Amino acid sequence: MLDDESGVPIFARNGKHLSEITDVGKLIVAIAGEIPGCAQDIKKIAQDHFAFSHPHLT
């Protein structure tokens, strides 16, 4: 679970049920939401570099 990997509680629990997101959880979720955009940026940089390095293959 993310709680175990991060070492901090992301969600407050009531038994086996999640009751709310913690304050630190809110910060982590906000940053995690940026990951897909960062991945797209990385892919675009790689594609641009490949196209520049191999113009006859594009």
Image (tube, rainbow, N blue to C red):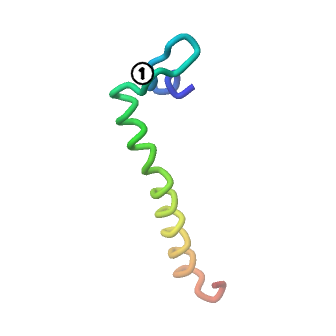
- Give the residue displayed 43% in from the left and 24% down from the top: 20
Residue 50's spot in the image, x, y percent? 57, 75
The answer to whether residue 7 is seen in the rendering is no
In the displayed structure, does residue 31 sit left or right of residue 1? left
Q: Residue furthest top?
A: 15
The answer to whether residue 58 is seen in the rendering is yes
In the displayed structure, does residue 29 sit left or right of residue 1? left
Residue 12's spot in the image, x, y percent? 44, 19
- Give the residue displayed 46% in from the left and 63% down from the top: 41
Q: What residue is pinned by disc 1?
A: 8
Camera-side residue: 23 or 31? 23
For the image shown, how many numbered marks are present on the structure?
1
Q: Residues within 10 Å of mark 1 (few under 14, many from 20)?
A: few
- Quadrant location, the N terminus: top right
Camera-side residue: 21 or 43? 21
- Give the residue displayed 49% in from the left and 16% down from the top: 13
Say which amino acid is labelled 1: Val
Q: Residue furthest right?
A: 57
- Quadrant location, the C terminus: bottom right
Camera-side residue: 16 or 36? 16
Question: Quadrant of residue 29 in the image?
Answer: top left
